[in-house]
Image (cartoon, rainbow, N blue to C red):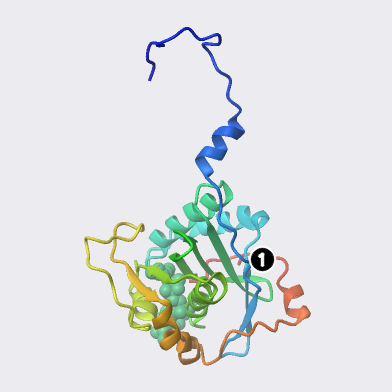
Amino acid sequence: MKFELPTKASQEILEIDAREVEAVLQGPALKLPPWPGATVALKDGRTLYIREAKLEEVPQMLAYVKRLLDVDHDFYDIVGARVYSEILGWYRKRLKDPYTLVGLIDGLWAGFANGRLMNEDINISLHTMALVRGGRIGAAMYYAKAYYGFEIIGNKEWWATYESYNGWLRWGLGMAQPSYPWPDVQHELGGAKVYYITKKYWDQSVKKYIRDMVGVDLDFNVPDAVRKANETLVVPEEILV
Ligand SMILES: CC(C)(COP(=O)(O)OP(=O)(O)OC[C@H]1O[C@@H](n2cnc3c(N)ncnc32)[C@H](O)[C@@H]1OP(=O)(O)O)[C@@H](O)C(=O)NCCC(=O)NCCS
């Protein structure tokens, strides 16, 4: 748009540093405490180590997630497409206050969970994926990010929604999550229903969900050997879902 100037200007063309534009587009970030890393002992004896993804791991994560767009069962394609944009949004700083957790078994990428902060109180759960099936890895990943929100960040409310039957079964039904009136309140993922957990409800009963589902709790006492074995993320050669 161009309007006529209402006064004389000594410089009619202003030069702008793109870094100044970037500051406007990004806005200030909330200071999120780090996820300390935790293990979950899977039923088959393997150890799932859940840590924060590293920014330098993004290119290989994106290359792998791109391949999920061709998986035409259990909603991996739509979830893959959205996860791709969320990881890229984190990388290119176009997602407000995101957090990205990966679940690794001896370095192999087996699980994913992410979300972002709407504000200090409300945590928006974005996506969870099991990249290896049958081990309830997705269940553990979702629990870890909710634990991060309520116990570590200090959020008061958790907003989720579900694209898939497995997701809804695991958490919508599994955690008996109530939903806000719809369509009055809509989740940013496609305008679907917002299922929510309050801190009170989390404390009352949801916290014990991982015990019921996976059979163990998150273990934050992570041996150095486990951290070391999972320092480098390795993407599976094949699609395993
Ligand atoms: C939702 C999701 C994260 C759940 O992961 P999970 O807890 O690790 O559970 P799985 O998907 O491996 O297994 C779910 C059920 O499928 C069946 N199943 C078991 N092994 C399976 C296999 N190899 N392949 C397919 N299904 C299997 C079982 O019934 C299992 O339930 P059970 O463990 O209670 O017996 C996962 O299904 C997923 O990533 N789906 C695609 C993305 C998605 O929908 N994300 C959530 C968005 S709402």
Dividing the image into four quarters, tell me where ligand 1 lies: bottom left
Give the residue drawn at x 47%, y 58%.
Answer: 83
User: To which quarter of the image does residue 41 belong?
Assistant: bottom right
Q: Please tell me which residue lies in front, 180 or 221.
A: 180
Any part of residue 129 in sight: yes
Q: Say whether residue 7 is left or right of residue 217.
A: left
Q: Position of residue 88 (x, y in %)?
A: 53, 50
The image shows residue 24 at horizontal and vertical percentages of: 52, 38
Q: Residue at x 50, y 40 (%)?
A: 25
Q: Residue at x 48, y 82 (%)?
A: 134
Q: Secondary structure at mark 1?
A: loop
Q: Residues within 10 Å of mark 1 (few under 14, many from 20)?
A: some
Amino acid, disc 1: Val
Q: Is residue 155 above or below residue 9?
A: below
> Which of 106/50 is in front?
50
Q: Position of residue 126 (x, y in %)?
A: 44, 63
